[in-house]
Image: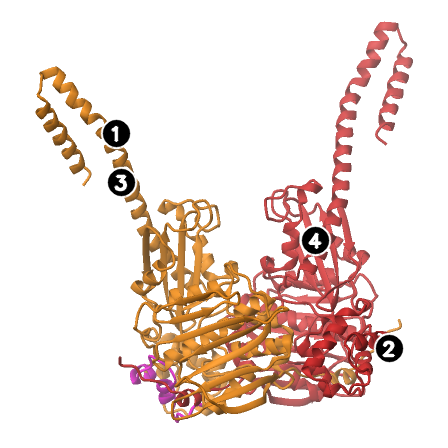
Chain colours: A orange, B red
């Protein structure tokens, strides 16, 4: 056997660290950069999502300008500009030139971004495919000058490289503008930038969106409300959502000096009384010094938590779009004869609160013999890919729509002029991949979506059966109406009525008829 | 509006790095730790895959011992022991206690592992769910003592924490043993550890596998060949598979002093002549100093590469299982009446060589009215999850199986007692997620799978039609056979034959009949 034998030593010489940028640059399809068309969508989406998050956190009504320019040869410049609070100078390089850097990962608060990967990944993709650095312009107030950066990511080290860093004149008082040149393909359709922006406008009626498409067309989505979404609170983890190993880590790093104060300060829904009960049930002293608690004690602590009655997590940390806003947003885009929506009460998966809301439009441009259209949103962000792998699709196909008077092939979406909307709002949306295209199938989430859709279905059924009854009445009354004059003529001939009496009888009968159905 | 306004400054105070371990600990479903049942499979799989890789690289016929012990209360101890080359002491903590650390990411070579995530993620999952550290015992030769480590990952820093580190007596001359205690559920079935090991034995007939299941049952898969898989070479990237930004990075870090020698030393299939042609077509001097090449020049270089004839990547870097081995492995598990396989010539996606092989078994325990069973492998590793998202499933359902004489519901797998096997061997398998459960849908990969399956289908058709013909002949001959004696009696009665003559005629006719179908 002519085989060069490796040994533990020769292997060891090759074992080394892999930077997270290298990892994702080689596996970029995990981030939504599978192909040039999707890359354009993903890059735009990451930039717009960040812009909206920043504006809302600062309490500013968002004005977003999206501009895509075709530079020929499968290259596009993507530019996204907002009127947000801006980014302080020292953080710009890290935010745009380092994967896994951000403010949203370490907290439990409803926001669009959560990973600290998206926008720097978009910049990295641009760099890999075109060699061009990312351009960022940002200004935090009229008192400060605007900063302009040109950055590229050093993938071997996952660190930003600053190519240019200068002050710049900018007509904006505050805001941020990101420009990325990337290999891309522009195509309209269901998985396009156009569609993403259209759906963003539906789920965010408080946003003004100016869109300059690469073919020269322009689109302006004007805000339909001046009201920002209700502010949501950051929450602490719920004791029941924390696993043993995580608990162990928290005990090691807490500043609390007693077990009872640790429980009260690090978790939500743990009052003094609850903390004391947990310690008692865990058979641990409430005075125990957190850092000294052994693994065995942690097991007891977990048991104590399991045995103590604790309120569900607070729910003022998640905000649905709201029935009125959602239907308003939808009606501006889909023109249906019937519209309904349903918002579920807050629920909890793995300690994370969430709310499901659903809407249904009947009528509009979806053909009568094609499957219903499903619009999916997570924390107000449209999800355009991987529908088949999404919890909401699963729920929508598992509902028995035939119960509500519509056709449905087995295991599929219902058929007809139907648009279904599902929105999940949560402090942490469990996506099936880093590209955030589909919601993972947690049974409790799927159940909530199913219930919301069933409620919409029941209302649809009422609408459809009323419609059917009305159509039936109309058919009958049309039928009778045709014969009323003949009754008049018949009476005239039989009992010699005068023309006036005939008219009188006819109009009385017609009058009775129209009164009947009401 | 009672909104606490965030500013650029308050936001900046929260922006910080996220460690890759924190990221994956919060998103552990991305790594295959979605639920306790899958966690047991994933952890075992990562350990076994590593063991096989190590043995093969060292030219050792693998003896693997897998032992799962039920510790009650949804806790299991997983133990995987191999007779591989062992791991040098200084590398053990990093390999088992740090995500994104390994020897396989930075090279293009066919292996089971590629990311440097799997086994440390399994340890992290164990730690999070049970608080127990990973135990590793390893020995590199009889001259050295065995080392025993107890490790846990510091997720905040993505660094190993050594709990225990000691020399130990071990009866093995060389090898490695990993033990992880984790929250898990043991269930048999199609997505179980049992099934993974069974399929591993099919695709790796050179492996001896001892399996101790948690319920006390034991299973021994004996090797059916003493021959290791052919060794495959590590290759350099192909010039056509490298993008502009990557090329730029390579130019910056190369040790070559001239563009022409850079091209020759860093890429496969670039001879002196090819390098000179590329420089010429790129309008760049072959003497140009790589580090000084500007972005504009890189664009020209890419153009030069595009315009130069370059051989496809070498293919001695990928090795199929081979028809004989594959059918041998299969026949020991599936008991079919007909078996065929097809190995495609090597192909290339994004510069990465790969080979597709497929096999088909007709008959066996798959019910006649249920969909065919699809066994998927990537670099000899069975893939048990996410079948619907896998390129091979897509190919298998897109083949028109009705052409080959079997039933097939639209858009589905064929129906019948059919087992289909698809194996992709490549220097870099493009998985759809970090958990490596499905192959991404590159059109060229799907095409190769389709062609391999079509070839199997054609052979199946020949088998089925021969079988049908034989059944038909048999039916006819049975039919005629019934009447032959009556012909004898008829003749006797008509022309007064003797009993001997009758027997003679009958046997001649019977003889003729049996000769006919051949």
Residue that lies at the very extreme toward the front in this rendered image: A216
Q: What SS does tag 3 mark? A: helix
x, y percent for residue B292:
73, 88
Q: Are marks 4 and 1 in contact (CB under 8 Å)?
A: no
- Nearer to us in this view, A121 or A137: A137
Q: State whether discs 4 and 1 lie on one chain.
A: no
The CA distance from mark 3 to mark 4 is: 54 Å
**Disc 2 or 4, which lies upstream in sequence?**
2
What's the chain of the residue with tag 3?
A
Residue on which disc 3 sits:
A470
Q: Residue at x 74, y 74 (%)?
A: B108
**C-beta proximity under 8 Å, tags 2 and 4:** no
* CA distance separating discs 2 and 1: 92 Å
Q: In the rendered image, which quarter is residue A443 located in?
A: bottom left
Front tag of 3 and 4: 3
In the rendered image, residues at marks 2 and 3 fall on the same chain: no
Residue B33 at least partly seen: no
Q: Is residue B407 above or below residue B243?
A: above
Q: Residues within 10 Å of mark 2 (few under 14, many from 20)?
A: some
Q: Which residue is mark 2?
A: B272
Residue range in magenta is: A254-276
Residue placed at 35% from the left, 60% from the top? A332
Per the image, label 1 sits on a secondary structure element best described as helix
Residue on which disc 4 sits: B450
Badge 1 is on which residue?
A: A479
Q: Is residue B34 left or right of residue B350?
A: left
Q: Is residue A88 above or below residue A188?
A: below
Dot 1 crowding, Cα within 10 Å, few <14, some 14–19, many 20+: few
């Amino acid at each position: 056997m002519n085989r060069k034998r490796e040994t533990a030593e020769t292997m060891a010489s090759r074992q080394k660290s892999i930077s997270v940028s290298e990892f994702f640059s080689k596996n970029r399809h995990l981030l939504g950069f599978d192909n040039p068309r999707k890359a354009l969508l993903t890059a735009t989406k990451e930039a717009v999502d960040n812009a909206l998050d920043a504006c809302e956190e600062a309490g500013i009504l968002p004005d977003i300008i999206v501009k895509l320019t075709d530079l020929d040869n499968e290259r596009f410049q993507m530019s996204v500009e907002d009127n947000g609070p801006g980014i302080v100078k020292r953080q710009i390089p890290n935010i745009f030139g380092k994967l896994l850097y951000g403010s949203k990962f370490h907290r439990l608060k409803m926001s669009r971004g959560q990973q600290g990967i998206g926008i720097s990944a978009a910049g990295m993709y641009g760099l890999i495919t075109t060699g061009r650095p990312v351009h960022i312009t940002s200004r935090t107030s009229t008192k400060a000058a605007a900063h302009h950066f040109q950055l590229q990511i050093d993938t071997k080290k996952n660190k930003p490289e600053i190519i240019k860093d200068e002050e710049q004149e900018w007509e904006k008082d505050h805001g941020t503008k990101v420009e990325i040149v990337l290999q891309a393909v522009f195509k309209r359709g269901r998985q396009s930038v156009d569609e993403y922006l259209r759906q963003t406008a539906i789920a965010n009626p408080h946003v003004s969106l100016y869109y300059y498409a690469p073919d020269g067309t322009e689109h302006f989505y004007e805000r339909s409300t001046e009201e920002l979404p209700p502010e949501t609170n950051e929450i602490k983890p719920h004791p029941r959502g924390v696993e043993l190993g995580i608990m162990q880590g928290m005990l090691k790093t807490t500043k609390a000096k007693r077990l009872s104060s640790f429980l009260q300060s690090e978790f939500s829904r743990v009052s003094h009384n609850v903390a004391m009960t947990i310690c008692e049930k865990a058979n641990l002293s409430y005075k125990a010094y957190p850092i000294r608690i052994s693994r065995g004690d942690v097991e007891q602590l977990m048991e104590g938590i399991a045995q103590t009655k604790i309120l569900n997590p607070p729910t003022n940390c998640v905000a649905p779009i709201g029935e009125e806003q959602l239907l308003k947003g939808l009606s501006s885009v889909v023109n249906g004869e019937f519209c309904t929506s349903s918002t579920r009460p807050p629920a909890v998966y793995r300690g994370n609160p969430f709310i499901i809301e659903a809407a249904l439009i009947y009528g509009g441009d979806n053909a009568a013999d094609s499957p219903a259209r499903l619009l999916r949103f997570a924390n107000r962000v449209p999800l355009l890919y991987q529908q088949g792998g999404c919890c909401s699709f699963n729920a929508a196909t598992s509902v028995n729509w035939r119960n509500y008077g519509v056709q449905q092939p087995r295991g599929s979406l219902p058929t007809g002029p139907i648009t279904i909307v599902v929105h999940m709002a949560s402090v942490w949306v469990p996506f099936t991949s880093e590209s955030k295209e589909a919601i993972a199938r947690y049974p409790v989430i799927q159940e909530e979506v199913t219930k919301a859709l069933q409620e919409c279905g029941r209302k649809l059924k009422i609408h459809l059966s009323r419609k059917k009854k009305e159509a039936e009445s109309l058919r009958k009354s049309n039928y009778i109406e045709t014969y009323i004059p003949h009754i008049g003529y018949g009476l005239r001939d039989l009992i010699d009525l005068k023309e006036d009496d005939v008219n009188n009888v006819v109009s009385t009968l017609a009058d009775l008829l129209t009164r009947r159905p009401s």
